[in-house]
Image (cartoon, rainbow, N blue to C red):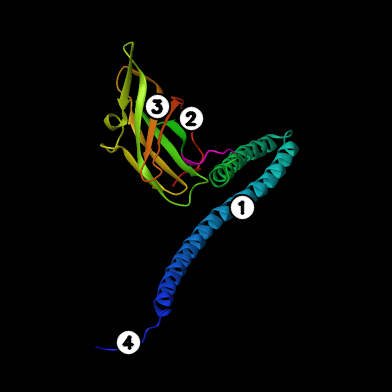
Amino acid sequence: MVLVPYRPGQKGKRIALWILSILLTATLCFAAGYLRGMRQNLHMLDQRTELREQVAELKTKLASLQEEAAIHRHGSELERQASERVRQENMALQNRVSELEEAVTFYKGIMAPEGKEKGLRIERLELSRTVNKKRFKYKVVMTQVADNGAYVKGSVKMNLLGVRQGKRESIPFDTIAKDWPGGDGAPFNFRFFQDIGGEVVIPDEFVPDQIEVIAQSKGRKAVRLERRFDWKLDEVTSNVGKG
């Protein structure tokens, strides 16, 4: 028989130290993740501030060019040419100001939306022409609004809706879009936004009128979104949402 000192409080102290170690480790992990997220969010806010400053600077330059255009409105052929040059620069600056204002609105809508809706969104669809009358460029912009602390993953399927020989048809993009993946569709994986784009070829005798976009996210907060866009061609000049 071996006599061992009996210390009734020793076991309780060991358990308390073990629990304290776990809580301290969890607290440090949470703090590290929180600081990382804050740095990324501050980076986005800095970008938005820079865009606002560029908008203000370009507006000032735009006003100066408008005054110059007024001075050169009348006069000789040389003055007319100078006025035309100023007009073209004026239009280019107006387009640039519109792009920057759109960019500010885009980032604000992601970081601090006015509505209560949060999470994954099918933000918009852009369509534009190519030199081939049957081939068109498309781009779907996916966003994660306000709730962008973690990455959202999933896939997107798209269908071209329209009429052929008097009958309604729905054509999957994996049969008409260049480089479109099969199976579950085009994958996405992002925190703030992601573009999904390419080119689509319209079948013979088919008249498109809508594009159907179906997004399915994965994970604990999985959602399924469906949205239809009218077939509307735009001359897209904005860089907003381009990854």
Residue at mark 4: 4
Q: Residues within 10 Å of mark 1 (few under 14, many from 20)?
A: few
Which residue type does callout 1 highlight?
A: Thr
- Residue 144: say if magenta: no
Residue at mark 2: 234
Tag in front: 3 or 2: 3
Q: Are marks 1 and 4 in contact (CB under 8 Å)?
A: no
Residue placed most toward the observer, 214 or 117: 117
Tell me which segment is drawn in magenta. Answer: 115-120
The dot on residue 157 is: none
Residue at mark 1: 49
Earlier sequence position, callout 4 versus callout 3: 4
Residue 183 x %, y %: 25, 37
Earlier sequence position, callout 3 versus callout 2: 3
Q: Residue at x 43, y 77 (%)?
A: 13
Q: Residue at x 42, y 42 (%)?
A: 195
The dot on residue 211 is: 3
Q: Residues within 10 Å of mark 3 (few under 14, many from 20)?
A: many
Q: Residue at x 32, y 87 (%)?
A: 4
Residue 155 visible to the viewer: yes
Residues at marks 3 and 2, CA–CA distance in whole angstroms = 15 Å
Residues at marks 4 and 3, CA–CA distance in whole angstroms = 80 Å
Residues at marks 2 and 1, CA–CA distance in whole angstroms = 29 Å
Residue placed most toward the observer, 221 or 163: 221
Helix, strand or loop at disc 1?
helix
Q: Are marks 3 and 2 in contact (CB under 8 Å)?
A: no
Q: Are marks 3 and 1 in contact (CB under 8 Å)?
A: no
Which residue type does callout 4 highlight?
A: Val
